[in-house]
Image: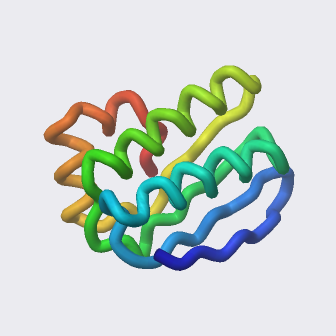
Amino acid sequence: MHYEEIEAEGSLQLNIEGKIDALSSDEFQSLILKAFVKSNNIIVNLASVPYMSSAGLRALILGQKTAESKGGKMIIINVQPQVQDVLKVTGFDSILDVR
């Protein structure tokens, strides 16, 4: 997994690239939590993420809870069809702000 951080109008956008699985989910989770230290509003761009395991979903839920506790928000954008299917099957698409 690779990533890029971009600051934009009161938000921090994380552009993620690669699979998010058991091997990379800890790094993904850490990246999200560190981003919330820098900004209360995070945008997670998953345009280049072809696969996400349940461990990646756990990181997103933790990010959502962190956003709520800080009075901020986490928006997930550009979700690929395979990842979107996982979000729908698990019901996470109704819990997370997916655009």
Q: How many marks?
A: 0
Quarter assignment of residue 82: bottom left
Q: Position of residue 11 (x, y in %)?
A: 77, 53
Q: Vertically, is 71 above or below 79?
A: above
Image coordinates for residue 83, horizontal then vertical, percent: 26, 59
Splitting the image into 4 quarters, where does residue 90 fall? top left
Position of residue 6 relative to residue 34, above or below, is: below
Q: Is residue 21 left or right of residue 38?
A: left
**Residue at the image point whose x is 46% and y is 44% from the top:** 59
- Whole-percent x and y of residue 27? 53, 60
Residue 61 horizontal side relative to residue 3, left or right: left
**Residue that appears at 65% across and 32% down:** 67
Q: Residue 65: which quarter of the image?
A: top right
- On screen, residue 79 versus residue 64, left or right, reads left
Query: Which colour scheme appears in the figure?
Result: rainbow
Front-lying residue, 21 or 68: 21
Q: Eyeballing the image, is 19 above or below 73?
A: below
Q: Residue at x 81, y 65 (%)?
A: 7
| Viewer-nearest residue: 64 or 31 | 31
- Residue at the (53%, 78%) spot, across then down: 2
Residue 63 vs residue 83: left or right? right
